[in-house]
Image (cartoon, rainbow, N blue to C red):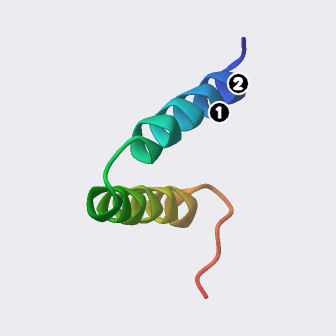
Amino acid sequence: MDESDERRADLVSRLEVIEAQALATRAQSYEALHDELRRRLETAPGSTDR
């Protein structure tokens, strides 16, 4: 399994945990995940400011 596959598996696991939560908690968890992924994309090599 390469690094990309590991990241994908980690994301899927995290999504499964989020989906098992109550609705209000799930919304907060998705918001936190969104913020984290946005930060990663913004700091990735080759990313551009919008």
* Cα separation between marks 2 and 1: 5 Å
Q: Residue furthest top?
A: 1
What's the residue type where badge 1 is placed?
Answer: Arg
Residue 28, quarter of the rendered image: bottom left
* Residue ID at (46%, 46%): 19
CB within 8 Å, label 2 to label 1: yes
The disc placed on residue 38 is none
What's the residue type where badge 2 is placed?
Answer: Asp
* Residue ID at (64%, 76%): 48
Where is residue 8? Give x, y as percent.
Answer: 65, 33
Where is residue 4? Give x, y as percent.
Answer: 70, 29
The disc placed on residue 5 is 2
Residue 20, quarter of the rendered image: top left
Front residue of 12/46: it is 12
Residue 36, quarter of the rendered image: bottom left
The residue that disc 1 covers is: 8
Instruction: Judge from the rendering whether residue 40 lies leftward or rightward of residue 24; answer left or right.
Output: right
Circle 1 — which element?
A: helix
- What is the tally of numbered marks visible in this picture? 2
Front residue of 31/26: it is 26
